[in-house]
Image (cartoon, rainbow, N blue to C red):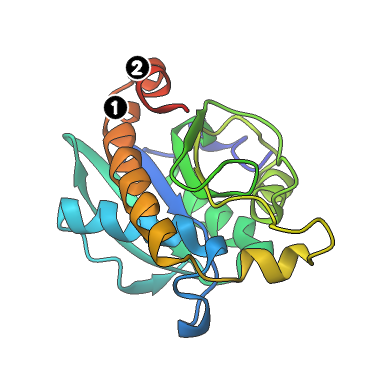
C-alpha cells in the first residue's frame, strides 16, 4: 500500500483530491468517455479554480469548495492509465484514498442519471481498474455519470464510449453534471449519505 508511511509525513493541508476521468485531446472532448472531464470542468468553473497547470501527468488546480481545500485533476494519461496520475497526486498531497473522489462515465446508467458510491469494484471500467490496481485501494468515493448503454449488442464498446452525445443527450448530461456538482459539495462536507439519498437514480 503506497500510503503506509503517511503517519511519518506532515499533512499537505489539502482536504480532498477530486479527479475527473477522460481522454486528452480535442477529438475526445465531448465523447461519452469524457463525462468525468466535463463534470470536473463545471465544478472547477463554479469554484473559480483554474485546472490548467501540468503536473502528476495531469492538468490540475487548487482552491476551495464548500470551505474545504481541494486539488482538482484531469489525468492526461488516457483513460486506461488514469491510476498513474491519481496515485502521483494523492501521494504528493498526502491525501488518503477515502478523501479522493472520482467522477467518471457509466454505460450501465441512462444519460442524465447519477450513481454515488462510497467504494466498490471497477465495474468493468478501465480507468477505475487502473486506479484500483495502482493505489491498492477500492475505498474511494465516486460519482458515476450515466452515458447510456450500447444501442446494439454487436457494437464495439470502444466505438460507443468514444461516440459523441446527441443534442438531447447533451441537455440531460448538463442536468446530471449540475447534480454531480451539488452532490460533490455534500460529499466533501461529510454528507455522502445525503448526497446518495438525493441524487442516486
The reply to whether residue 55 is visible in this rendering is yes
Q: Is residue 186 above or below residue 63?
A: above
Figure quadrant of residue 15: top left
Residue in the foreground of this view, choosing between 3 and 76: 76
Q: Residue 131, percent across and down?
A: 65, 49
Q: Residue 165, percent across and down?
A: 48, 65
Residue in the foreground of this view, choosing between 145 and 8: 145
Q: Residue 126, percent across and down?
A: 71, 55
Residue in the foreground of this view, choosing between 183 and 175: 175
Left or right for 159, reference 182:
right
Rendered image: mark on residue 134: none
Residue count near mark 1 (Cα–Cα under 10 Å), binned few <14, some 14–19, many ≥20: some
Q: Is residue 77 above or below residue 114?
A: below
Q: Is residue 180 above or below residue 60?
A: above
Identified at 30% across, 66% down, the residue is 51
Determine which residue is flagged by label 1: 186
In the rendered structure, are the residues bearing label 2 and label 1 in contact, judged by CB atoms less than 8 Å apart? Answer: yes
User: What secondary structure is marked by label 2?
Assistant: helix
Residue count near mark 2 (Cα–Cα under 10 Å), binned few <14, some 14–19, many ≥20: few
Determine which residue is flagged by label 2: 194
Amino acid at each position: 500500500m503506497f500510503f503506509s508511511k503517511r503517519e511519518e509525513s506532515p499533512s499537505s493541508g489539502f482536504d480532498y483530491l477530486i479527479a475527473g476521468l477522460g481522454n486528452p485531446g480535442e477529438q475526445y472532448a465531448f465523447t461519452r468517455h469524457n463525462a468525468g472531464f466535463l463534470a470536473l470542468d463545471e465544478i472547477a468553473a463554479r469554484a473559480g479554480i483554474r485546472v490548467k497547470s501540468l503536473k502528476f501527468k495531469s492538468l490540475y488546480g487548487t482552491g476551495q469548495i464548500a470551505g474545504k481545500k481541494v486539488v482538482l485533476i484531469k489525468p492526461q494519461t488516457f483513460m486506461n492509465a488514469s491510476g498513474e496520475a491519481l496515485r502521483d497526486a494523492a501521494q504528493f498531497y498526502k491525501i488518503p484514498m477515502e478523501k479522493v473522489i472520482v467522477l467518471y462515465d457509466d454505460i450501465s446508467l441512462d444519460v442524465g442519471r447519477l450513481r454515488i458510491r462510497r467504494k466498490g469494484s471497477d465495474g468493468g471500467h478501465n480507468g477505475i481498474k487502473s486506479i484500483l490496481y495502482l493505489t491498492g485501494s477500492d475505498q474511494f468515493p465516486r460519482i458515476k455519470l450515466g452515458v447510456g448503454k450500447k444501442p446494439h449488442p454487436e457494437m464495439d464498446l470502444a466505438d460507443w464510449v468514444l461516440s459523441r452525445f446527441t443534442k438531447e443527450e447533451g441537455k440531460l448530461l448538463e442536468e446530471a453534471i449540475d447534480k454531480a456538482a451539488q452532490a460533490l459539495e455534500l460529499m466533501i462536507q461529510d454528507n455522502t449519505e445525503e448526497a446518495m439519498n438525493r441524487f442516486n437514480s
